[in-house]
Structures are given as C-alpha cells and as structure tokens.
Image: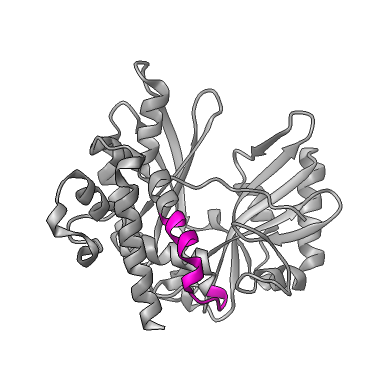
Amino acid sequence: MELYKMDKIPNFKNLAYVIKKEYKLRKKPTITFKSTVKLHGTFAGIAYDGTEMWAQSKNNPITPLKDNLGFANYVEKHHEYLLNCVKHIQEHYECGKVLITGEFVGKKIQKGVGVSEFKEKKYFMFGIKCYYEKQDEWVWLEEPSALLGGLENPNRNLYSIFNYQTNEIKIDFNKPEEVLEVLDNLVDKIEERCPVAYSFNISGIGEGIVCTGYDEDGNRYVFKHKGIKHRNIGNKENKVQHYVNEEHLGKVSEFVRVTVTANRLEQMLEETFDTLNGGEAHIGGTGTFLRAVYSDVITECRAELDEFDLEPKDVSKEISRISKEYLMDCLDAI
C-alpha cells in the first residue's frame, strides 16, 4: 500500500493571490466554479492500484488494525461493493490507479456541526483521481457528479456530495473582491443550517463550501470558503489574543493575530498527535507540532504575508512562540 497524496485546498483569498502571481501583467481568467457543501469530518480516500484496494487518511494508508476513526473498517465491511466501484472506474477510464476522495462524518469524528450528529457514520464522495502511467500523471475527473451519483448506495452509508446543494459561481479574477459578498452569503446560509444534515432531518450548523472550476486551458482550480466559526483566518474579534505579546506590536504581531487562530492550533494539535483516534499531546512532540503550525500558516496565508509585506523568516519566531505556549497550556490541562 502506498499513500496517494492530496494537495491542500487554499481559501479564496489565497487562490486569488496565486492566480495574480501566475498571470502577472496578463489579463486574469474568468472561471465558472461549482460549489458543494464542505463537510466537517475527516478526509477519507479509497485507493486502488489495479490489484489491491485500501483505505487511506490524508497522511497515511490505514487498516482495520491501524484505523482512522473507523474508516478502514467501513471499507472492509463494504469491500466487495467498493472494489467493484473502483474496478469500474479503472476500466471505464482506462487508467492504472484510482483514488476516490471524500469525507467520513458522524458521531465521535468532529463535534459541534450538523453532520456530527449522524448516529451511523457516513461516507460522502466528492472527487475521483485517475493515474495514467504513460504520462506519469494523476488526472481529476472534470465532471464526476454523474459517476459518483451512480455509485451512491444509502444502504451502505455511501453518498455523493453532488446530490446536495450545489451552485455555479462565475469569478472574474481581475476583480475577485466583487464575488466575496456572494460567497459569504452562500456560506452564511450553510453555517446557519447544514443542508446535508438537514436532508437527514438533523438541524445543525455547516462548515462552508468547496468550489472547483477549470480555465480555458483545462487547468483545475479549487478553493474553500468557510463560515466565521470555522475559519483559520481570524479578524480582530477572532484570534488567540492572550498569547500575543502586546509589547511588540507591529506587522509581525498583527499578522500572527490574524492567522494563528485557535481553530488552526486545534486542527494542528489533532493532526500532530492523532487526538481524534485517542492519541494524546506530549512534550516529545513539541518540535513536530511547531513545524506543523508554521508550515500550515506559511502555506495557507501567502496573501496575508504579501499584504503585511513580510517574509516567512520574519514571522517564524513569533508563530513558534505562540504555538509553544498553546501546547504547554494543553499539556497542563491533561
């Protein structure tokens, strides 16, 4: 088994920043995106290499004996049906390897959102990648909704995210700020009541949206847009206030106020110490945790760095200081 890697999905602000840098002085594209509901669970993939099928988390292949929140056991339980699914995809698209991507949701995976109230865990598929050996290239299926809808099987708690709320959003990246109100309105309604949970007669908040689109050359662009309660980018009311050194105000401190949020620190703590699967934070993992927070901030907050006219080296010390204080507080609470 090998890990079929997934790229991080940027937020809208950082995608606009990347496109601005890519196109420089050229006219930027206008792209039509399809939005789907972003679920707050755990990433889960079903991988197939032409011979063997396995489950994987975002960072590792998993097995029923070394699982991630029960997903490998779910794949084992429905092995025959899922194997037929990936074989069908491989044969139809004449590819060598297949990865179905999705989100595994339900009780004891995340908390505080509508889909975390599902008594039985459910798998919502949102994408398919195919690997072509001759080109040595992974390719996303551009329009997977029909295929994923055909694979959906409620008796196996297997669903397609495209069968729930979707929207088309046209974005002119020469003036991306003009679409922010549209994105915020969509997300506000989902955060108020998750449409996926509501379809199962559960009222609860949602997380946001994921938008996917292609330019005229077939290049794929994806971004996420979350509600205020789930954002890792803060504002003046949404920050880890008490960790910031008030004696050293300035661009660095303000950047850290906005980007090193409680949501981000909690997410990195979960990923570093695998707390959702029973792991506990420990002092020996301090270095790994600090590197995880720093990497996540620098990867996802390039637009903010540019706005503050800062380089990664300018903020590394302050990010590490705040991350360490947060971790020490967590250890004291254990």
Image position, residue 121 (x, y; %): 59, 74
Q: Quadrant of the N terminus?
A: bottom right
- In the image: residue 249, left or right of residue 293: left
Would residue 96 be found to the left or right of residue 57 on screen? right
Left/right placement of residue 101 relative to residue 31 reads right
Residue visible at 19% across and 44% down in the picture: 251
Q: Which is more toward the observer, 255 or 164?
A: 255
Image spot of residue 78 (x, y percent): 76, 69
Residue 112, x across and y down, in percent: 39, 74
Q: Is residue 92 magenta?
A: no
**What residue is rendered at 84% in x and 48% in y?**
50
- Residue at point 29%, 51% (across, down): 184
Quadrant into which the C terminus falls: bottom left
Q: Residue furthest top?
A: 26
Position of residue 196 in the picture relative to residue 102 (left or right) = left
Magenta segment includes 292: yes
**Can residue 325 be seen here?**
yes
Residue closest to the eye, 326 or 93: 326
Chain part drawn in magenta: 276-293
Query: Would you identify the image quadrant in which residue 13 lies?
Result: top left
Instruction: Give percent across and percent down for residue 264.
Output: 37, 60
Which SS does the magenta portion mostly show? helix
